[in-house]
């Protein structure tokens, strides 16, 4: 008997919906990262991209616990002297909640090429509606 190794030919991808309304941003991002990597499947293979599609709805209703809304910053740098831009997460969650969710999920994924391919299967929406009803996504609960 040989060991099963997942690859593109023998994996089956499903679609899942995560509702972020009233749930912490980090817990929702952790659940999305597990689904994107495929760690919930018995045929999980670390070096292969065997994850599923994930739809996150109500990203604007995700909450930040503690003092993160005022103390946590989203920082970008242009590469030039004095090119640092800082935005508080309170403002980021009001203006671009999709970006905040994507950054949280990306931070919970490994730093390799599998992550780049996995993040293309992450769909994030501000409201409760999404255009992926034809794929028949299953709801996934975040504890």
Image (tube, helix red, strand yellow):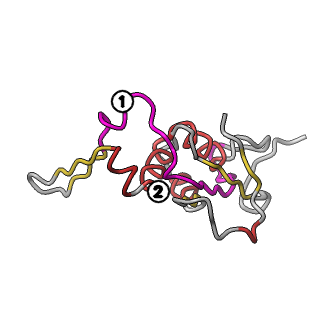
Specify start and end residues of the magenta stretch as a single range.
Answer: 46-73
Q: Position of residue 6 (x, y in %)?
A: 75, 51
- Seen from the viewer's position, the closer of residues 95 and 98 is 95
Mark drawn on residue 98 = 2
In the drawing, does residue 139 fall left or right of residue 19? right
Magenta highlight on residue 100? no
User: Which of the 4 image quadrants contains residue 57?
Assistant: bottom right
- Quick check: 35 left or right of 113? right
Front position among marks 1 and 2:
1
Where disc 1 sits, the SS reads loop
Is 49 a magenta residue? Answer: yes
**Residue at screen point 63% across, 42% down:** 34
* Residue at the farthest top position: 66
Q: Is residue 142 left or right of residue 139?
A: left
Q: Secondary structure at mark 2?
A: helix
Residues packed near mark 1 inside 10 Å, few (<14), some (14 to 19) or many (20 plus):
few
Question: Counting residues from the N terminus, which is met first, the one under dot 1 or under dot 2?
Answer: 1
Coordinates of residue 58 in the picture (x, y in percent): 56, 53
117 left or right of 51 in image? left
Say the numbered circle drawn on residue 130: none
Residue 67 disc label: 1
The residue that appears at 91% across and 40% down in the rendered structure is 1
Q: Judge whether 5 appears above or below 10 on screen.
A: above
Residue at the outermost right position: 1
Residue shown at 17%/56% (left/top)? 79
């Amino acid at each position: 008997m040989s060991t099963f190794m997942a690859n593109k030919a023998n994996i089956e991808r499903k679609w899942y919906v995560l509702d972020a309304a009233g749930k912490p941003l980090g817990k929702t991002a952790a659940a999305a990262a597990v689904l994107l990597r495929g760690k919930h499947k018995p045929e999980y293979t670390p070096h292969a991209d065997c994850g599923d599609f994930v739809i996150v709805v109500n990203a604007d209703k995700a909450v930040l616990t503690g003092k993160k809304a005022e103390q946590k910053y989203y920082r970008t740098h242009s590469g030039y002297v004095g090119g640092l831009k800082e935005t508080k997460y309170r403002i980021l969650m009001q203006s671009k909640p999709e970006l905040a969710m994507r950054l949280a999920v990306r931070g919970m994924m490994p730093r390799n090429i599998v992550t780049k391919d996995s993040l293309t299967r992450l769909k994030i929406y501000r409201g409760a509606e999404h255009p992926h009803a034809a794929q028949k996504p299953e709801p996934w609960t975040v504890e």
